[in-house]
Image (cartoon, rainbow, N blue to C red):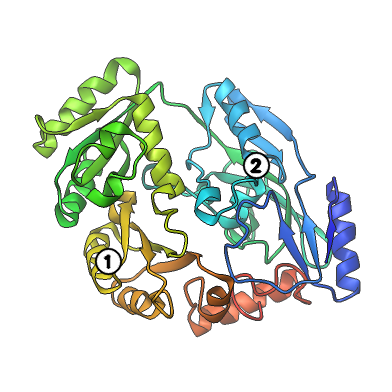
């Protein structure tokens, strides 16, 4: 297997055109941080996009940044931090979860997977901040969509289409984001001792206040004990975490009002900026479920009002463990290896009744090849998916089968 490593968009287009002419499938790769995520591929060669690096445009006054797809995420975040700004969706880093510690996440890889962290509940998903893309489709044609302003979209919104397509529609070469000012201060209120049901009510209630809660998660006692943050690990009980971000002069008052609203004035912990950032980093990057490594890990999305009951039923039925994010709308669940299908049938049956979708984020390649990694689409949606694939990659050159067999 050869690795093709162009350094510009023209080189990417030439590589794809050559593969298209030879009917030769390509696996797309950025920094390799998500290796092992999605269905395993059998391709002739790998097309590396890591050589497409560099920030091409950054205008802090316009709150917009454009970078080539292979640009390391750390480079983008450092440039934004120097101007007191950030990517709104709090990008996660799954390297430790997937065992890819030596890899480097790229900005294009984030877009391909549409990955968002705890701030999604308050600020939206990655695709909500993505305003422009350039990519090479499966016939080697350079496609572009969007621009430097949110409303610069006409016709088919390719920006939203390629976000989360996992490279099955095109090889991303450039992405443009709307960014936000970085909050001056943050503080997390950690309410101890709530069971999942009461935690869910507390989180949704907190988000309904005008206090602008930026993230809401619930850690059962056994997960809290694994934290590297001493206050969290030493609590000895479940913790419901509510993050507030504001100006330094205001944040203390907001936390006090939130604690009063929740009736947690005396027992709640206040995690200051360093501890707050650390524990939310663990929640964002799913490091609390990284071990033991033989467990399959699911990312399950549903309505926040249904998440807590779903979490309790699945952890009990599958002998699993996990935690809640997005105010209960996101369930992270680790399942023991003795489950023949990693609990897939049980999880999908539960979601059929409640609504939502589940993604198998970590599992051995043999299991990812045998069961649905992504939520199985309806017949109508699959027919549409195939037509879209036909339009952009008719010969199935790019990441064939990454999401669904035959697509």
Q: In which quarter of the image is the N terminus?
A: bottom right
| 374 is higher (above) or lower (below) than 166 | below
Residue sticking out furthest to the top: 249
| 174 is higher (above) or lower (below) than 261 | below
**Left or right of residue 65: residue 185:** left
Percent across and percent down for residue 75 are 65, 32
Q: Residue at x 24, y 36 (%)?
A: 234
Mark yes or no: residue 394 visible: yes
Percent across and percent down for residue 49 are 76, 51
- Residue 356, by quadrant, is bottom left
In the foreground, 401 or 364: 364
Percent across and percent down for residue 98 are 54, 56
Q: Which mark is residue 124?
A: none
Q: How crowded is mark 2: few (under 14 residues within 10 Å), some or many (20 or more)?
A: many
Q: Residue at x 31, y 54 (%)?
A: 323
**Left or right of residue 337: residue 148:** right
Residue sticking out furthest to the bottom: 379
**Left or right of residue 259: residue 80:** right
Distance Cα–Cα, label 2 vs label 1: 39 Å
Q: Name the residue carrying label 2.
A: 176
Mark yes or no: residue 220 visible: no
Q: Which mark is residue 315?
A: 1
In the foreground, 333 or 374: 333
In the foreground, 327 or 370: 370
Q: How crowded is mark 1: few (under 14 residues within 10 Å), some or many (20 or more)?
A: some
Under tag 1, what secondary structure?
Answer: helix
Percent across and percent down for residue 276 are 34, 31
Instruction: Judge depth for marks 2 and 1 and give the one in front.
Output: 1
| 104 is higher (above) or lower (below) than 254 | below
Under tag 2, what secondary structure?
Answer: strand
């Amino acid at each position: 297997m050869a690795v093709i490593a162009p350094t510009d968009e023209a080189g990417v287009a030439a590589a794809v055109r050559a593969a298209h002419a030879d009917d030769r499938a390509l696996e797309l790769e950025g920094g390799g941080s998500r290796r092992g995520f999605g269905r395993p591929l059998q391709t002739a060669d790998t097309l590396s996009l890591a050589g497409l690096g560099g920030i091409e445009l950054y205008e802090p006054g316009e709150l917009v940044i454009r970078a080539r797809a292979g640009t390391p995420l750390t480079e983008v975040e450092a440039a934004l931090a120097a101007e007191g700004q950030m990517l709104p969706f709090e990008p996660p880093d799954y390297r430790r979860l997937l065992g890819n510690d030596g890899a480097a996440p790229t900005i294009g890889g984030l877009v391909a997977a549409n990955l968002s962290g705890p701030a999604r509940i308050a600020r939206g998903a990655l695709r909500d901040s993505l305003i422009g893309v350039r990519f090479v489709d499966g016939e080697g044609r350079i496609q572009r969509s969007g621009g430097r302003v949110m409303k610069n979209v006409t016709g088919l919104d390719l920006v939203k289409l390629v976000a989360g397509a996992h490279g099955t529609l095109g090889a991303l070469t450039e992405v443009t984001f709307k960014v936000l000012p970085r909050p001056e201060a943050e503080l997390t209120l950690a309410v101890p001792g709530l069971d999942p049901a009461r935690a869910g009510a507390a989180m949704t209630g907190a988000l309904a206040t005008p206090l602008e809660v930026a993230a809401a998660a619930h850690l059962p006692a056994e997960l809290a004990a694994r934290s590297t943050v001493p206050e969290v690990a030493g609590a000895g009980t479940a913790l419901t975490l509510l993050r507030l971000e504001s100006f330094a002069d205001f944040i203390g008052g907001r936390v006090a009002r939130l604690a009063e609203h929740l009736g947690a004035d005396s027992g709640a912990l206040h995690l200051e900026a360093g501890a707050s950032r650390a524990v939310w980093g663990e929640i964002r990057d799913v490091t609390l479920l990284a071990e033991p490594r033989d467990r399959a890990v699911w990312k399950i999305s549903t309505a926040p009002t249904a998440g807590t009951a779903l979490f309790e039923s699945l952890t009990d039925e599958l002998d699993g463990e996990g935690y809640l994010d997005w105010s209960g709308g996101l369930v992270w669940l680790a399942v023991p290896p003795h489950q023949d299908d990693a609990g897939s049938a049980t999880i999908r049956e539960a979601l059929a009744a409640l609504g939502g979708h589940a993604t198998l984020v970590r599992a051995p390649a043999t299991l990812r090849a045998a069961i649905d990694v992504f939520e199985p689409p309806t017949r109508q949606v699959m027919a549409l998916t195939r037509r879209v694939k036909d339009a952009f990659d008719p010969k199935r050159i790019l990441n064939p089968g990454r999401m669904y067999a035959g697509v």
